[in-house]
Image (cartoon, rainbow, N blue to C red):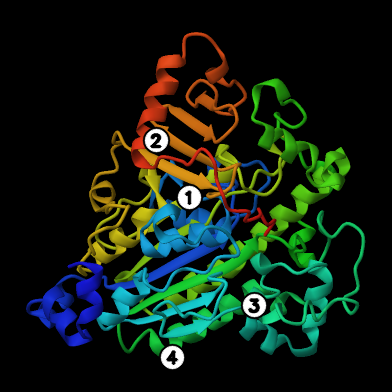
Amino acid sequence: MTRKQFLSVGPAAVAGLSFPGRAAAQSARRPKNVLLLMSDQHQHGCLRIDGHPVARTPNLDALARSSTRFDSAYCTNPVCTPSRASLLTGLYTHHHHSWNNSTPWPFEHKTIANYFSRAGYITANIGKLHCVDAQTHGFDYKLDFNDWFQYLGPKARLYADELGHPNSGSGLPQIDDLWRDFGDPWKGVRQAFPGVDIGRVSKIAEQDHFDSFVARESIRFLKNHGTKQPFFLISSFLRPHDPFMPSERFASMFPPDEMKLPDTWGKVDFATVPKDIQRRIQNGMRQMKDADGARLHTAMYLGNLAEMDNALGQVLSALRELGREDDTIVVYTSDHGEMLGEHGLWQKFVFYEPSVAVPLMFRVPGLTQAGARSRTHVSLTQVMPTLLELCGLPVPSGLDGDSLLADLRDPATRDTTVFSEFDLRNPGAKYMIRRGDYKLNYYVNDISELFNLKDDPKEMKNLALLPGHTDKVEELRSELFAWYAPPEKAASTIQDRRR
């Protein structure tokens, strides 16, 4: 069924198309509920189960042990809004046209919530959606930053202070247009302090943090609605994204002087990287160019991650206590990663593995193998068709991603190709292709990067500049251009916002 056909029929018609003998088929096909747990800016290697020396992620580790994991999963765009749009629409950025953190998701591209809602599910997004306008995108039940600010009341001032500046990626404002006419209402009111980018212990009480709010409200939803009809729930946490200000309990777990800086920190040869990378290293956060600042920032990031893991664990515990664990598909992922000092870089925006690779795990009762792992290269565009197929719902035509059901049944590594893109429509646009051991990062109007990730997992040796690799560069570039031919001259002046 196409998107146009989907929109032209009512719920009953969709149910008839999707489920001949629906009631009997549904009871035979359980599980049918979906819990999609999502974080923001989680570097895929920051899990204790994967050998990270200091990360505290007991709940994610436990979920990983009971799930099938994709060790080579990629976001479609290493920045929040476009990546989330891809996850929920199954489309790459140049198809859904949510170009950056300032462009809303176009209404005509329906999300996974639309399809589940039409099939009789109650759909909910609790937490960060980051669609940067007021659309609900098919969710019947939605709580986001503005609902949290209502909960906080006057304590919202503490959060404004900790952010230090407007930042829709952190929810203040949640929708930029609300401040468009009269400017930032917190200007001259918030109490700025040095080192806001590095982080510190939060002054906000643990129970008042956004991730605690998301956990609490997700549990309330499960109790009030999760036993009455099938549900599709996204619990979307902010952390480990900034502000890097965990509660005292979690900050104290990570003494800054015990943090180890990455092996690549301060070791990039500028002659071998594109100008964009040079600029990001040179103009990055001043405080983190100092080793002590970098260690403190790393500690606060890991504190954020530990606090998110704790909140996520509360939701999983409630699912179990409510007796819904055995008939609920659980998925965990993040919208993009975090460089965390690798290559001297912080945040995301680039195609190195810590930024563009993401954690991805599926726990499907009766199907997935506990502890199984796949090295197949997969994309967040594949989450939507996978969940629809797992629940017996029709997968719309025209998606960029295909279902991972076969991989969940048999996690053997397949030969696949994935792509990512960033800063489209600008002169500095860049695109990535990963196939086999090789990754090509193509920069419009700049040099390319070619890496053999098997031999060079830290991506420090740019083979595109060395003899003997021209054929591989041309092979991958041809495949990249067949997927999407980048304009050599971009006319737009959309700016890269640090959100």
Q: Work out whether residue 357 can be spotted.
A: no
Q: Is residue 74 above or below residue 16?
A: above
What amino acid is at disc 2?
A: Leu
User: What is the x, y in percent for residue 465?
Assistant: 57, 16
Q: Residues within 10 Å of mark 3 (few under 14, many from 20)?
A: some
Label at residue 177: 3
Secondary structure type for disc 4: helix
First in sequence, mark 2 or 4: give its number.
Answer: 4
Q: Quadrant of residue 36?
A: bottom left
What amino acid is at disc 4?
A: Asn
Q: Is residue 265 above or below residue 365?
A: above
Q: Residues within 10 Å of mark 2 (few under 14, many from 20)?
A: many
First in sequence, mark 1 or 2: give its number.
Answer: 1
Along the horizontal axis of the image, is 320 left or right of 311?
A: left
Residue of label 2:
480
Residue of label 4:
224
